Image (spheres, rainbow, N blue to C red):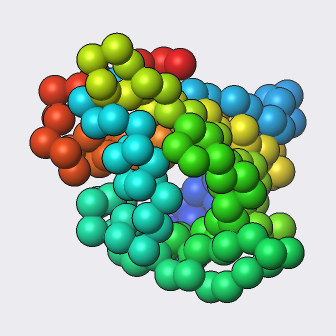
Amino acid sequence: MKSLFKLFLAILAVSIITVGLMAVVGMTVKKQHVVSRLVRTNQPPEIVWATIIDFSSQASWRKDLKAITHIGQQDGKSVWLEEYQDGMAIPLETTIADSPRFLIRTITDPNLPFRGNWEYKITSLPNGGSILRITEYGEIKNPVFRFLGHYVFNQAETIETYLKNFVSKFGESNSKLEIG
């Protein structure tokens, strides 16, 4: 029984030291980050715009979403709650909407361990298609989460998932994501 207790204490000590080191290293990582990806699609800008602005139907083509619900207006701006398959829920407000070229959505919950916004730019291509570029301007408050976001996870993963789901919606799964 004593050896089991010693093992428990050793595991606890290693865990505390690990989290402490992650916090110390995380403090050296900038709070703010910018990541950008783009995809070329055969869809004209008007179709791209109509798709990205139709929030109520996004759960039907975004595999990472469980549901999306309009939760009202905040300062005259539309706010939607995105509920993800992993249980996370993020309220996003449409900060700027300039049809059919430019959209900014901003996280409205100040209690989340991160904040920021997504900027969508739609550019026409000569062949009638478009480029959809999404840029995330984010901030991670907690140094442990900054460590994980910088060294463990792909900070562009959410954008990449969105763009892959977007082109799959149109059967364009051969479109390649590009760093933008």
Question: Vertically, is 65 above or below 16?
Answer: below
Question: Vertically, is 85 above or below 95?
Answer: below
Question: Vertically, is 12 above or below 46?
Answer: below
How many discs mark residues in the rendered view?
A: 0
Q: Residue at x 62, y 85 (%)?
A: 71
Q: 143 or 1: nearer the eye?
A: 143
Q: Residue at x 65, y 47 (%)?
A: 98
Image position of 170 (left or right of 8) = left
- Residue 171 x, y percent position in the rendering: 13, 42
The residue most toward the bottom is 71
Image position of 127 (left or right of 90) = left
Q: Residue at x 17, y 35 (%)?
A: 172
- Residue 127 x, y percent position in the rendering: 27, 17
Q: 144 or 51: nearer the eye?
A: 51
**Among the 4 quarters of the image, the one containing residue 21:** top right
Q: Residue at x 72, y 52 (%)?
A: 96
- Residue 82 x, y percent position in the rendering: 52, 70
Q: 156 or 167: nearer the eye?
A: 167
Q: 62 or 56: nearer the eye?
A: 56
- Residue 180 x, y percent position in the rendering: 53, 19
**Among the 4 quarters of the image, the one containing residue 111:** bottom right
Residue 94 seen by the camera: yes
Image position of 68 (left or right of 80) = left
Residue 16 seen by the camera: no
